[in-house]
Image (spheres, rainbow, N blue to C red):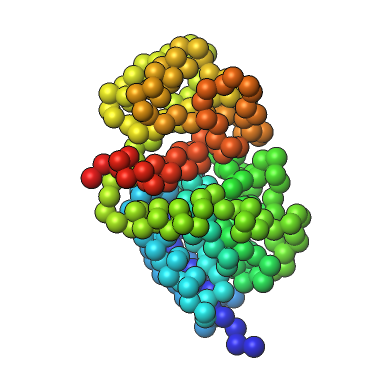
Amino acid sequence: MHQKNTVILGTGGTIAGQSVSASDNIGYTAAQVGAAELIAAIPALATSSHLLVEQLAQIDSKDMTFAVWVNLAERVRYFLSRDDVCGIVITHGTDTLEETAYFLQAVLNPVKPVVLTCAMRPATSLVPDGVQNIMDALTVARHTNARGVVAVCAGVVHSALDVQKVHTYQLNAFSSGDCGPVAYVEENALRTLRDWPSQHQLRTLSATDSIAVLAKALSDETWPSVEIVMSYAGANGMLVGALCKADVQGIVVAATGNGTIHQELEAALLKARSQGIEVVRASRCVNGRVLPKLGEFLTDSNGLSPVKARVELMLRLMLLPSAVQA
Ligand code: SIN
């Protein structure tokens, strides 16, 4: 059978980073090496005729913008629609990878695999991790059982809904929390650990809503303004008051434990909600989910971390025409 193409979309990150000294794994500049150059340096891939490489952005992912997301969603949608393409790999910085993964999953809910990969060490490192991560990501993108948006790092495959960066330095920097990873990549083969999440399980917006949200995102409208506040010892309503004055449309609160919020912050959030601002409660705990109790007033994030709950809320607000400022 004719081998299908795999697409590699470069967006920057440490995987494309350069440092002056090969022994410096932290004092580097992210997003310096082009995706084509990264691939050309991998002997197993340099002469592959089934790889399509495109540079979509060249940024440190801490500086991720909605414009890059929109561009990415558009190109991913285009390549997925092609019969000659079996899957897509996106090289990305680790810092906001989980947000991009969640966004793409929500708006595209793809059948084919879309694999985000990254590195914790720059390309110039004495022992870089990016090369193996790219090879592993390609294994997943070409696998017949793989589907949906996943992240691959240090040989571990995480679903877009569960993945979270949990380490500042180690190569295996991501976790799927309570859900556990979907699979491991071992010597170009997948060892699947649990049922691969189905398109139905991965759907966060209805099919009609994801089409509508993507259409909105692709248009030039400003995205809804949603900010995150955290509950902690001594928290108060000052930041929420400032956000209300700034006319935000949504606030996600990173609550303590099982969704508890300092009483002063909670009072401010309830006031904000009474003024028409959407408020969603997530937990600042890395594992577990908020289990709603009877008599609670704030919507919970359905297990999403604060940053993913923010993406979800922005997308949902896009569905309300009045919530998006022209
Ligand atoms: C980034 O997120 O772009 C820089 C950090 C990294 O990739 O590890």
Left/right placement of residue 195 relative to residue 274 reads right
Residue at far bottom of view: 1
Left/right placement of residue 288 relative to residue 242 reads right
Query: In the rendering, at what x and y percent does residue 254 appear?
Result: 51, 28
Judge whether 64 appears above or below 280 on screen.
below
Query: Within the image, what quadrant is residue 223 found in?
Result: top left
Nearer the observer, 158 or 203: 203
Look at 39% across and 42% down and name the residue there: 317
Look at 45% across and 66% down and name the residue there: 77
Left/right placement of residue 178 relative to residue 16 reads right
Residue 267 visible in the snapshot: yes
Judge whether 209 appears above or below 140 on screen.
above
Query: In the rendering, at what x and y percent does residue 23 appear?
Result: 53, 50
Look at 62% across and 72% down and name the residue there: 142
Query: In the rendering, at what x and y percent does residue 131 appear?
Result: 57, 63
Left/right placement of residue 281 relative to residue 174 reads left
Q: How many marks?
A: 0
The quadrant of the rendering that contains the C terminus is top left
Query: In the rendering, at what x and y percent does residue 249 appear?
Result: 35, 34
The quadrant of the rendering that contains the N terminus is bottom right
Query: Within the image, what quadrant is residue 200 found in?
Result: bottom right
Nearer the observer, 51 or 235: 235
Residue 92 visible in the snapshot: no
Nearer the observer, 6 or 81: 81
Look at 62% across and 27% down and name the residue there: 292
